[in-house]
Amino acid sequence: MGKTDNNKSPIVLKSRENETGAAWRIWKKYNDIFGKNITMFCALVVIFITVSIVIFISAKGLSTFVKDGISPLHFLFSTQWWPDRPLEEGGPLVGSFAFIVGSLIISLLAVLVSAPLSIIVAVFMVEIAENWAYKVLQPAIEILAGIPSVVYGYVGLSLLVPFIRESMGGSGFSILAGFLVLSVMILPTVISVSADALRSLPGEWKEAALALGSTRWQTIRLVLVPAARSGLITGVILGLSRAFGEALAVQMVIGNTRKLPTSILDPIITLTSAITMDMGYTVTGHLWNNALWSMALLLLTMSLFFITLIRFFSRKGVVQ
Amino acid sequence: MLKKSKWIILAAAMLIMALAAAGCGGGGAQDGEAQKEEPKTEEVSGNLTSVGSTALQPLVEKAAADFMAKNPQAQIVVQGGGSGNGLTQVSQGAADIGNSDVFAEEKDGIDAAQLVDHKVCVVGMAAVVNDKVGVDNLTKQQLIDIFTGKVANWKEVGGVDQKIVLVNRPKGSGTRATFKKYAIDNAEEAQGIEEDSSGTVRKIIGETPGAIGYLALSYLDGSVKPVKIDDVEPVKESILSGQYPVWAYEHMYTKGEPDGLKKAFLDYILSEDVQKTLIPELGYIPVTEMKVSRDAQGNITQQ
């Protein structure tokens, strides 16, 4: 308050007081507090939403273990998914191992394809591209990012699945189709984060490397990419996290078979698609429904894990 | 700069107040209107939500649209979400009507005693195959062998030499429950491709060589081939007479006896208008024409 007043010339202050009178003086006195409170309120709303979602999912997800007495080990490591089997035939079983494995396989393979490609594209964009190439590449990536996931899924279902069926056999609904679709979907995320990381490097480093006689390739390989390492890893983890959480596009092309795959052409199911497939048919508060919430909790935990990883790398990544 | 930001805040505050005032005003006006017109007319009015079965959804949506056209004061919202969702919401009082493909008694965790069942129509389900498998009739035993994975090639049941690809709906789907209960005698299905919607199932079976699955008759459009079970064709006539066993009631549940708009809407769906024209048009079978009836335990009685 005091600081602002000091910056004003007394004449302006006086004339304004004359113009608007008491209301203006009160407003002027309290607007700082008002502004502070409004920003704080908005921040609290965001925190409140996050915390309540976490609490809600945890409460729902943990009731599988607390209320229904399912052992967490069974949930995580059993492939026996019979949530509708009556008690007398061995009880409802909610082993989700096949879903967890499915999610891991699909997203890791997608990142394996997408990460090298994205980092190379990012290097090209930042260090190599002529102006016109950059002008084409940038919007191309933005368009990729803007395509809704249902469209990716639909294209995969209509083009990729028949193609795999005809050229490689099987039903076409497969791990292969799933991770190919996903790898395209996460490209823009990984590219833009990687490009930002490369762009934020001090220009002197590049100049120094060149001045020491490095070729352009040596500069990129030995100086720029290693220096941007933490940013690149962050991009890859963000991509992995997006791949892990994607539901719709994947569900459309993987066939959703609830067992462990034996080949890359086998259909598979992920945590996300297991949730979307079943949620409409279950009764709230019942074991089957709770098991779906436990899967949601697992997804949330994974995403927290990814965020922690990113934090770890970005803190560590300040280049010495 | 500072001055500008102050004005922006002021303007924003005023905008919010204005919007809030407008919102309140609008609401008030609407309430006033409703109160004004209620005593004048005999028309039903109010709000109603109908939630649940996606198999029944097209019919309820169409019927609701026609009903609202006749009763402009009534507002009916129709949502999908699945049979389980419909039953949960209606028993919790979150929805006025819960649509379901299965009897409430068949669903675990639902207190069926407090729900009132309104059977609005019947839907038949057929085993459907890709039209290149070379089979148009299966015995019940063959069907069971196929769905439990005992038979893995179409040539074992008289078709071409082609691997069988199973296409299931999720466990808990009303179509799957009905098919499992009445077509394959509750045998445990082998794992296969699983798809959330009947439309996707139809697309996959139409495109994938050797595929077999099941669909409600309202989804048959010529792209897939329905097969006869024990020489009985899955058509309306054989369902009406009780010869073809794979069919289910479409239920609209209310919590307690329906009144007001709920009753008016359910009466409308059971009226001649809807039963004689809309229901056959959308591929369902009017419940009034059935010559047999079935209870929650699956017992059939002749009417």
Image (cartoon, grey):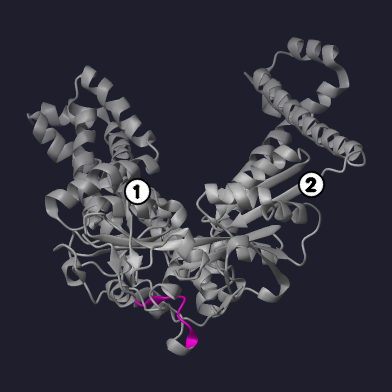
- Confirm whether the magenta stretch covers residue A86: yes
- In the picture, the quarter occupied by the N terminus of chain A is top right
Residue wearing tag 2: B46
Alpha carbon distance from label 2 to label 1: 41 Å
The residue where tag 1 is placed is B222
- Tell me which segment is drawn in magenta: A79-87
B89 w.r.t. B64: above or below: below
Q: Position of residue A98 (x, y in %)?
A: 32, 69
Label at residue A140: none
Q: Is residue A274 magenta?
A: no
- Would you place residue A117 above or below residue B3 in this image? below
Q: Residue at x 78, y 40 (%)?
A: B73
Image: B94 above or below B222:
below
How many marks are shown on the rendered structure?
2
Residue A230 seen in the figure = no
Image quadrant where residue A267 sits: bottom left
Image coords of residue A176 (percent x, y): 21, 53
At horizontal 34% and vertical 62% (from top left) the residue drawn is B213
